[in-house]
Amino acid sequence: MEVPDDAVLFDMDGVLVDSETYWYQFEDEWVYEEAIESGDPDHEEVTGMNYREIHDYLTEEYGTAVTKEEFVEAYNERAESLYGENVELMDGANDLFDDIRAAGRKLAIVSSAPQAWIKIVRDRFGLDPLDLVLSADDISEPGKPEPHIYEHAAAELDLDPEECVVVEDSVNGIESAARSGAFTVGYRSTHNAELDLSRADVVVEGPEELRETILG
């Protein structure tokens, strides 16, 4: 299958930055220990989802022991240090972004994270300029794994989803991109080494394979 050359849309968590490892720790230590009533969720059940929708999902599936406001506040408090201090940028990301721009392709971050979290990463690692930064908070429809966020992103770029390359690492994110019709690249790293990413059009192992797939 030919890789589209109009735009590249990057998920943030688990792709551009290695945040999933830290979020998994937060889930194990607080979310699954204190915030739910019972059960033992798998990380991949909620990875890639907006944190407000994570609360809704956990409430329905496991019951929650904290209010949504408390849940959101806990995530926001953790996010400040997680993105501001803990995470590291994907190797070669800045050069990859520069080369995508040089090739005349549109460049976007499309994330379940709120804009405030994305801005920390953009500023800390110098990822601008971008043609679009879209958060699940910016749309009225449900976020990943539903396809709406990538449909919106393509429309904002004056493209069809089929003209976009999407780079995703989570089962929910890949499902969202695939359902939108975008060419979906599954990005495999240590945190998702055992996950089934077969819904993606192609799966790459790390930054070098990703670069080769996007730029040839």
Image (cartoon, helix red, strand yellow):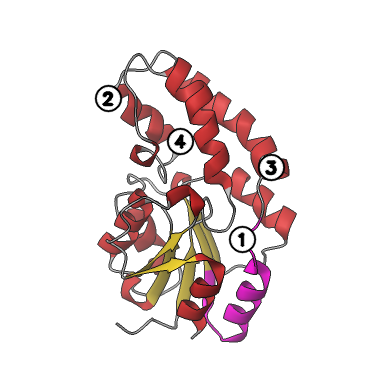
Image position, residue 213 (x, y; %): 45, 78
Image disc number at residue 125: none
Nearer the observer, disc 4 or disc 3? 3
- Of 54 and 208, nearer the camera is 208
What kind of residue is marked 4? Tyr
Q: Disc 4 to disc 3, how far (Cα)?
A: 19 Å
Q: Secondary structure at mark 1?
A: loop
CA distance for labels 2 and 3: 31 Å
**Residue of label 2:** 60
Which disc is residue 51 wearing? 4
Q: Mark 2 belongs to which amino acid?
A: Glu
Instruction: Kindly state the secondary structure of the residue where label 4 is placed.
Output: helix
In the rendered structure, the answer to whether residue 109 lies left or right of residue 87 reads left
Q: Which residue is mark 1?
A: 90
Relative image position of residue 24 (x, y in whole percent)? 50, 36
Q: Is residue 63 above or below residue 128?
A: above
Does residue 99 sit above or below 66 in this rendering? below
Question: Where does label 3 land, which residue?
Answer: 86
